[in-house]
Amino acid sequence: MLARRFILGAFLAASAAFVGCGGEGGPSLSPVKGVVKYNGAPVQGASVSFLYESGQLAVGATDASGSFSLTTNGRPGAPLGAAKVGVNKVDTAAGGQDTTTMKPEDMQKMQMEIMKRGNQAAAKPPLPLKYQDPSKSGLTAEVAAGGVDKNTFEFNLVD
C-alpha cells in the first residue's frame, strides 16, 4: 500500500512538472536579428514586431545602429513561419517611452495598443504611420529553422 502511494505520488509530481513545462515551451523559436533604416539612415529606439496569423507576437528594439533581435513571450527568437512586420518609434521628446529600455512584455503591450487604436497619433511621428501596424505596413518576413544565418532581415523604410 505504501509502495503504491509512493508510485502514485511520484507519477503525480512528474505529471505536474511535465504540464508546467508546456506553457514555458510554447512554439518552436528561431533566433532573428535585423536592421531598420529610414531614408537610408539607421533608426534608433524603434520597436519591431512580427505578427503571425495565429496572433503570436515577437518583438524587439533597435539600438544606435538600427539593429534588433526578437523575443517571444520573454524567450529569445521568433516562431517559424510567415509574419507581418511593424516598425514603430515614439518621439520621446513628445512624452513617449524609449523602447530601448522596455521589457519585451511591455513592448508587446505597447504594440497591441497601437494596433487597437489604429494609425492615430497626436503629434507627427518620427516614422511614417504606415509602418506602425504589422497588418497594414506591407512589410513581411519568413522565419525559417536553422538559426540567425537564415533569419537576418533588413527593413528600409521610406516616406
Image: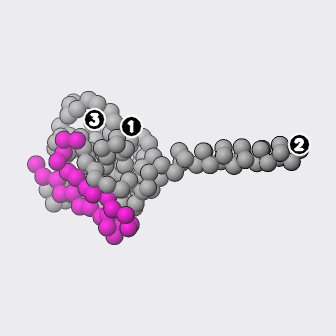
Q: Residue at x 86, y 48 (%)?
A: 3
Q: Residue at x 18, y 57 (%)?
A: 156
Name which of mark 1 and mark 2 comes first in the sequence.
2
Marks 1/2: CA–CA distance: 52 Å
Q: Residue at x 21, y 57 (%)?
A: 155
Q: Are marks 3 and 1 in contact (CB under 8 Å)?
A: no
Residue 91 percent across, percent down from the top left: 27, 41
Q: Do we see residue 132 in this rendering?
A: no
Horizontal side of residue 100 vs 122, given as left or right: right
Quarter of the picture holding the N terminus: top right
Residue 37 percent across, percent down from the top left: 21, 57
Residue indicated by mark 2:
1
Question: Which portion, as a residue range, is magenta?
Answer: 135-159
Horizontal side of residue 41 vs 24, given as left or right: left
Query: What kind of residue is marked 2?
Result: Met
Marks 3/1: CA–CA distance: 10 Å
Q: Secondary structure at mark 1?
A: helix
Name which of mark 3 and mark 1 comes first in the sequence.
1
Q: Quadrant of residue 41?
A: bottom left
Query: What kind of residue is marked 1?
Result: Lys
Horizontal side of residue 81 vs 105, given as left or right: left
Closer to us: 18 or 147? 18
Residue indicated by mark 3:
115
Give the farthest residue toward the left. 159
Residue indicated by mark 1:
109
Name which of mark 3 and mark 2 comes first in the sequence.
2
